[in-house]
Image (cartoon, rainbow, N blue to C red):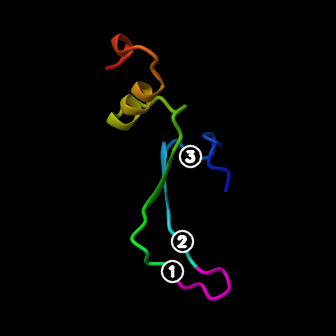
Amino acid sequence: MNLNNSKKSSNSKKSIERFVKETGMQINDEAHIIYVNSQIQDETELERLMHDFSCTSAKDMY
């Protein structure tokens, strides 16, 4: 899965679940991994937050 390929999915976030490859058993370690494609500009709260993270000046933030 190429998480950076926005052409396949317009969804800016991907939730990742971990599991043991050999057994298929899910790892329930209560860790939550979320990858966010900050290049997608879809006018959501998440997009605005990602925009703010990339700003070098507070005056450019939402």
Residue 31 percent location from the top left of the image = 43, 66
| Quarter containing the C terminus | top left
Kindly identify the residue that appears in the image at 50 percent across and 78 percent down: 27
Of pointers 2 and 3, the one earlier in the residue sequence: 3
- Disc 3 residue crowd, few under 14, some 14–19, many 20+, Cα 10 Å: few
Kindly identify the residue that appears in the image at 53 percent across and 40 percent down: 37
Three-letter residue code for mark 1: Gln
Of pointers 3 and 1, the one earlier in the residue sequence: 3
Asked whether residue 24 is drawn in magenta, I would say: yes
34 to 23, vertically: above or below: above
Residue 51 percent location from the top left of the image = 43, 26
Q: What SS does tag 2 mark?
A: loop
Residue 61 percent location from the top left of the image = 35, 18
14 sits to left or right of 8: left
Residue position marked by numbered label 2 in the rendering: 18
Q: Which residues are magenta?
A: 20-26
> Residue 50's mark?
none
46 to 23, vertically: above or below: above
Q: Are marks 2 and 3 in contact (CB under 8 Å)?
A: no
| Quarter containing the N terminus | bottom right
Residue position marked by numbered label 3 in the rendering: 9
Q: What SS does tag 1 mark?
A: loop
Kindly identify the residue that appears in the image at 48 percent across and 42 percent down: 12
Three-letter residue code for mark 2: Arg
Q: Are marks 1 and 2 in contact (CB under 8 Å)?
A: yes
